[in-house]
Image (cartoon, grey):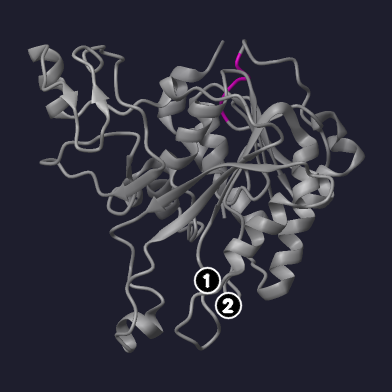
């Protein structure tokens, strides 16, 4: 736990350009910082309460990683089987009601396996269908992303290492949903740096034009327009950032080897705190915040955990709200807002 005398309002000021939105001031509010506030409690109950009614129609992006549909209970709480499916479906109209007309929902969900069987469960896919088709939610799947971690430990261990029958389950699903076919989005804000080959092509000013075997006709100048980077892909590779390897952000996120060296992890270690075991990658949250929102927009994470989303929103000068049922995770998340990286975003 963070020291008992930790301030209720931790460092940081509300961005001067933020929209005039009053965040709920309730007993469930644990702290506020950098244009946002964190609340302790059941997210569905809080978000449908009178105190939170002012958020309806104001959330531009709901980005979260809810408890995965695992077969065993984890310390951070998770449901299993049909109970998980019904729970996910019940959340859809609650979340949809909070969105602006052109707002988005981004949910990261991992895979699950059938109990004591080397067979992958369909629960994650069934949850997507139930959530998307939930009565009163009016949602549609805009696009699916895959979050691939080549450094992930071998799992499920029973069928990968103990009995070498399956390959490593190394990815999670990321689903982007909205109430409209055209939610706010601009891929020019999340361009990847050009590859060396593309930089050389632009410098050279020429390439092999003409018709390809695929029957696509490549013009003589179509690839000579320097747009500042290439359009991001729907596959995110979460990997260690090695000194000898060219990094093409935002597709390559610092995850496996460097996540343990960031400010939050170091602050937890210094205080003897065990950090949340299922933290969302910072790069993943930052990508969608940049892609789907503008400065001053409101970002919500109803399963905030260690509050990666709130921190990423603060870095990008967005308003934020986070909720979690476990007070110890909310408490440890305060450490994020002592990160010196946030100082340059603070307004006098």
- At horizontal 48% and vertical 56% (from top left) the residue drawn is 275
Q: Nearer the viewer, residue 313 or 88?
A: 88
Does the rendering let one see residue 41?
no
Q: Quadrant of the N terminus?
A: bottom right
Residue occupying the far left of the picture: 204
User: Percent x, y for residue 263?
Assistant: 39, 41
Prevalent SS, magenta region: loop
Can you tell which quarter of the image residue 87 is in?
bottom right
SS state under label 1? loop
Marking on residue 112: 1
Would residue 13 be counted in the magenta stretch? yes
Q: CA distance from mark 1 to mark 2?
A: 7 Å
Q: Counting residues from the N terminus, which is met first, the one under dot 1 or under dot 2?
A: 2
Would residue 100 be counted in the magenta stretch? no
Give the magenta part as a residue range: 11-15
Does the rendering let one see residue 228?
yes
Q: Quadrant of the C terminus?
A: top right
User: Percent x, y for residue 167?
Assistant: 32, 74
User: Percent x, y for residue 83?
Assistant: 74, 71
User: What residue does disc 2 label?
Assistant: 71
As drawn, is 14 to the left or to the right of 116? right
Q: Please tell me how crowded label 2 is: few (under 14), some (14-19), or many (20+) other residues with Cα within 10 Å.
A: some
Number of numbered discs present?
2
As drawn, is 177 to the left or to the right of 275? right
Contact, CB < 8 Å: mark 1 with mark 2? yes
- At horizontal 62% and vertical 11% (from top left) the residue drawn is 16
- At horizontal 33% and vertical 63% (from top left) the residue drawn is 152
SS state under label 2? loop
Is 118 rendered above or below residue 314? below
Can you tell which quarter of the image residue 253 is in?
top left
- At horizontal 23% and vertical 44% (from top left) the residue drawn is 241
């Amino acid at each position: 736990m963070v020291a008992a005398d930790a301030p209720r309002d931790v460092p940081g000021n509300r961005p001067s350009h933020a929209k005039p939105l009053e965040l709920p001031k309730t007993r469930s509010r644990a702290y506020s910082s950098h244009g946002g506030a964190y609340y302790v409690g059941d997210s569905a109950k809080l978000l449908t309460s009178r105190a939170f009614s002012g958020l309806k129609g104001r959330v531009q992006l709901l980005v979260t990683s809810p408890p995965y549909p695992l077969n065993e209970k984890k310390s951070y709480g998770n449901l299993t089987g049909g109970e998980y499916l019904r729970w996910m479906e019940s959340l859809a109209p609650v979340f949809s009601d909070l969105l602006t007309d052109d707002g988005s929902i981004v949910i990261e969900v991992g895979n699950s396996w059938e109990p004591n069987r080397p067979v992958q469960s369909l629960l994650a896919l069934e949850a997507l269908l139930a959530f998307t088709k939930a009565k009163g939610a009016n949602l549609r799947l805009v696009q699916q992303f895959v979050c691939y971690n080549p450094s992930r430990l071998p799992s499920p261990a029973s069928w990968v290492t103990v009995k070498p029958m399956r390959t490593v389950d190394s990815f999670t699903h990321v689903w982007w949903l909205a109430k409209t076919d055209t939610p706010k989005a601009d891929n020019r804000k999340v361009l990847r740096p050009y590859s060396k080959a593309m930089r050389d092509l632009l410098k050279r000013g020429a390439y092999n034009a003409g018709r390809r075997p695929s029957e696509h006709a490549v013009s003589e100048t179509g690839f000579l327009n320097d747009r500042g980077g290439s359009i991001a892909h729907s596959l995110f590779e979460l990997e260690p950032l090695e000194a000898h390897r060219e990094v093409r952000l935002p597709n390559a996120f610092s995850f496996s080897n460097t996540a343990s060296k960031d400010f939050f992890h170091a602050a937890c270690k210094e205080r003897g705190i065990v950090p949340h075991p299922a933290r969302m990658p910072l790069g993943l949250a930052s990508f969608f915040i940049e892609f789907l929102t503008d400065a001053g927009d409101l970002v919500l994470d109803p399963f905030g955990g260690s509050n990666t989303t709130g921190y990423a929103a603060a870095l990008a000068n967005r308003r934020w709200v986070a909720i979690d049922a476990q007070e110890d995770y909310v408490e440890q998340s305060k450490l994020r807002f002592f990160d010196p990286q946030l100082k340059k975003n603070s307004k006098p």
